[in-house]
């Protein structure tokens, strides 16, 4: 039985939907345009339901500047390569950024920059696995599945980039 559950909340102006299984958090949706088949076939729960593992509470703490690391069980589906990239993303400290090139070096394959970028973009649990902390080698914010405005907001929140950059 592969039951899934979800709940949603607007936190810091971002609509966040958390999708979970009995094992852990499966996906985080940021400002989704519509509810796809994954959500339509899932059971909606109250935000504080135990099957959501306190994810929305931890996200509220993160956006309030009170949480720098997440302590949530994850139930991620992906290739071995994707999982390797996502595991490495979790090592990027709060308030720091890394380039796609440096990330590919850390996983032991400097030539896999494009594949690393693709795996980063397919990260199903944005914020919790901090794919927003990966930037271009030139320091520019590049690609973010939920939009560069949200990536910028997250990096500003963490103090990883200066608001002066956008004057």
Image (spheres, rainbow, N blue to C red):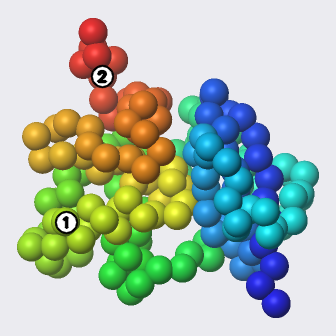
Q: Which mark is residue 153?
A: none
**Mark 2 Cα shell of 10 Å, populated few (<14), some (14-19), many (≥20):** few
Residue located 46% across and 35% down the image:
150
Task: Choose top left, top right, bottom left or bottom right for residue 21.
Answer: bottom right
**Mark 2 = which residue?**
162
**Mark 1 = which residue?**
114
Q: Position of residue 127 (x, y in %)?
A: 51, 50
Residue located 45% across and 63% down the image:
123
Position of the C terminus by quadrant: top left
**Mark 1 Cα shell of 10 Å, populated few (<14), some (14-19), many (≥20):** few
Q: Nearer the viewer, mark 1 or mark 2?
A: 1
Relative horizontal placement of residue 34, taking residue 69 as reference (left or right): right
Helix, strand or loop status at disc 2: loop
Q: Position of residue 45 (x, y in %)?
A: 89, 57
Please say if 135 is above or below 103: above
Helix, strand or loop status at disc 1: helix
| Residues under numbered marks 1 and 2 in contact, where contact means CB atoms less than 8 Å apart | no
Relative horizontal placement of residue 89, taking residue 71 as reference (left or right): left
Residue in front for this viewpoint, 32 or 66: 32
3D distance between C-alphas at marks 1 and 2 = 27 Å
| Badge 1 or badge 2: first in the primary sequence | 1
Report whether residue 11 is seen: yes
Task: Choose top left, top right, bottom left or bottom right for residue 74.
Answer: bottom right
Please say if 79 is above or below 154: below
Position of the N terminus by quadrant: bottom right
Task: Choose top left, top right, bottom left or bottom right for residue 86.
Answer: bottom left
Q: Position of residue 135 (x, y in %)?
A: 25, 46
């Amino acid at each position: 039985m592969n039951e899934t559950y979800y709940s949603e909340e607007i936190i810091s102006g971002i609509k966040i939907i958390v999708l979970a299984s009995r094992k852990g958090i499966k996906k985080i949706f940021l400002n989704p345009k519509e509810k796809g088949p994954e959500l339509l076939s899932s059971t909606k729960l109250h935000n504080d339901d135990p099957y959501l593992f306190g994810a929305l509470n931890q996200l509220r703490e993160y956006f309030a500047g009170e949480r720098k690391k997440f302590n949530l069980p994850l139930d991620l589906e992906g290739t071995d390569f994707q999982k390797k990239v996502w595991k490495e993303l979790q090592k990027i400290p709060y308030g720091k950024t890394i380039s796609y090139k440096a990330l590919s070096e850390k996983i032991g394959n400097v030539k896999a920059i494009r594949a690393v970028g693709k795996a980063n973009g397919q990260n199903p649990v944005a914020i919790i696995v901090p794919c927003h902390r990966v930037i271009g080698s030139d320091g520019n914010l590049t690609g973010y599945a939920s939009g560069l405005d949200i990536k910028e907001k997250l990096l500003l929140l963490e103090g990883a980039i200066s608001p002066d950059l956008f004057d």
